[in-house]
Image (cartoon, rainbow, N blue to C red):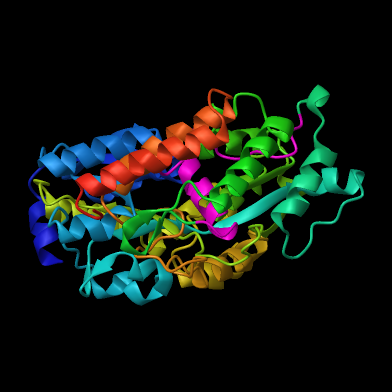
Amino acid sequence: MGTCLAAAHAESELTIATVNNGDMIIMRQLSSEFEKNHPGIHLKWVTLEENVLRQRVTTDIATGAGQFDIMTIGNYEVPIWAKQKWLAELHPAADYDMQDILPAVRQGLSVNGQTYALPFYAESVMTYYRTDLFKKAGLTMPESPTYDEIRGFADKITDKSNQVYGICLRGKPGWGENMAYVTSLVNTFGGQWFGMGWKPLIDSPAWKAAVNWYVSALREDGPPGATSNGFNENLALFASGHCGMWIDSTVAGGLLFDPKQSQVADKVGFAPSPKGAYGKGPTWLWSWNLAIPASSKHPEDAQTFITWATSKEYVKLVAERKGWVAVPAGTRASTYKTPEYQKAAPFASFVQHAIETADPNGQTAQPRPYGGAQFVGIPQFQALGTQVGQTIAATLSGQVTIDQALASAQSSVTRTMRQSGYSH
C-alpha cells in the first residue's frame, strides 16, 4: 500500500457516484472522518436515485468519459464490466481480510480470480410484516408463507380509511426496481425470462399467473400510486406505519428495526420470501459495491477510499455513531459474530442464513441459459428489464391488460435478442 501513501501527498479530488439509499447517506456523512485522516484526498459526492445512477454510470463507463473515480454498482454489472476491461483490478492489503467477506458475496465480485469491486452491503429478500396488525386480525405468519396465504392476510389487514395498506411492493419501473421483485416472483410461480436457445418465455401461463397476483394484490390491498414506489418509497411507507406487509430486500431490516428511523420498530416481524406454485427457483442475491472505473485519474486514492468504506473499521465507526442496528449488512462474517450486533438486530442470523444459502443460479422450472435470480446476467438486460418494467407498470395503472402487456413484452424482447445475435 506504499504507493497509496506516496500518491496521497499530491492533492486529489475523487468524484463518487452513489445511490440515495440510507446506508450510502450514512457513508457520505461519515466520510469526513476519512478526509480528516487523508488530508490530501477530497471527496465530491454525486448521490442519485437508483434508476438515474444506473443510467449515468453505465453511459460514463461505456464511453470512457471518466467523470467518476468511484462508482456504486451491483453484482450484475461487476462481471460484465470486468470482462469489458472497464474496471480497475483491486488489491486490498492483507489486513482488509477478504476471507471475512461472505463467500456468496465475494464470488460475485471476481472474474478469473481477480477482484473488481468491494461490497458495501449485500442483501437477499424477506417478508416484513406488522405483528400488531396480525395480532389484531387473529393471524399467524407461517414459518414459510405461500403467495396465496400472503394474499389472504393482505385482504384482512387492509384498512384504507386509516391509510393502512395490506401489502406494499415495488411498482416503480426499472430493471432493478419493479423487475427485481417481479422476476423473483415469476421464478417461484414457475416462469423465467428465457428457455434454452434464448427463446423468450414471457407470454406464458406462469408469467400471467405471477403478474395477475401482483396486479390484483396491489390494486386491492396496496397504497395508491404504486407505480411511483420503489425500494425507498416503500421503506418510508412501512416505517411510517402505512404497510401491513412488504416483500423486499433484507437490508431494510436495519432501517425498520431502528427506532430513530422507524415508527414501527417494535412491531416488525419477518419471514422468508413467499413461495408460488413452483415453490423453488433461484434466490435473490444483490450487493451494492464500490468499484473504480479504468478511466479514473486517481486509482490509488480511490482504492484507499473504497477499502476504508468497506472495512471492519468502518463497520465499527457506524456502530459508534449510529448504533449497531444501522451498520451495513450482509457482507462481513465478523459483523454477524459481534454480540452487540446480534442483540441490536433481531433479524441478523436470519439475514446471514438467507445470504449464505442464496442461490442466484438455482434451478428454474425449465432449463435456462443464464444466471441471476432477480436479473438476467447479460449486458442486454438493462435495456430489456427497463422496457418490460414500463410495460408491467402500465398494467398496474390499468393502461393495458396483462395479456396485452405480456404479448408486447414477448415481441420486444424477441426483437432485441435477435438484433443482439442471441437467437435467430
Residue drawn at the location 46% of the way across and 59% of the way down: 373
**Residue 392 falls left or right of residue 104:** right
Q: Please state, as top left, top right, bottom left or bottom right, where the N terminus lies in the image.
A: bottom left
Residue 219 placed where, x, y %?
Answer: 68, 31
Number of dots carrying numbers: 0
Residue 421 vs 113, above or below: the answer is: above
Q: Quadrant of residue 39?
A: top left
Q: Of helix, strand and loop, which mostly describes the magenta segment?
A: loop
- Seen from the viewer's position, the closer of residues 311 and 296 is 296
Residue 93 placed where, x, y %?
Answer: 23, 71
Kindly tell me whether residue 97 is visible in this rendering: yes
Residue 409 placed where, x, y %?
Answer: 42, 39
Residue 223 placed where, x, y %?
Answer: 67, 29
Residue drawn at the location 31% of the way across and 62% of the way down: 197
Spot the residue most to the front: 424
- Seen from the viewer's position, the closer of residues 386 and 241 is 386
Q: Does the segment drawn in magenta span residue 103?
A: no
Residue 244 vs 351, above or below: the answer is: above
Residue 6 vs 49, above or below: the answer is: below
Q: Which residues are magenta?
A: 164-191
Residue drawn at the location 55% of the way across and 68% of the way down: 352
Residue drawn at the location 17% of the way across and 38% of the way down: 60
- Seen from the viewer's position, the closer of residues 212 and 33 is 212
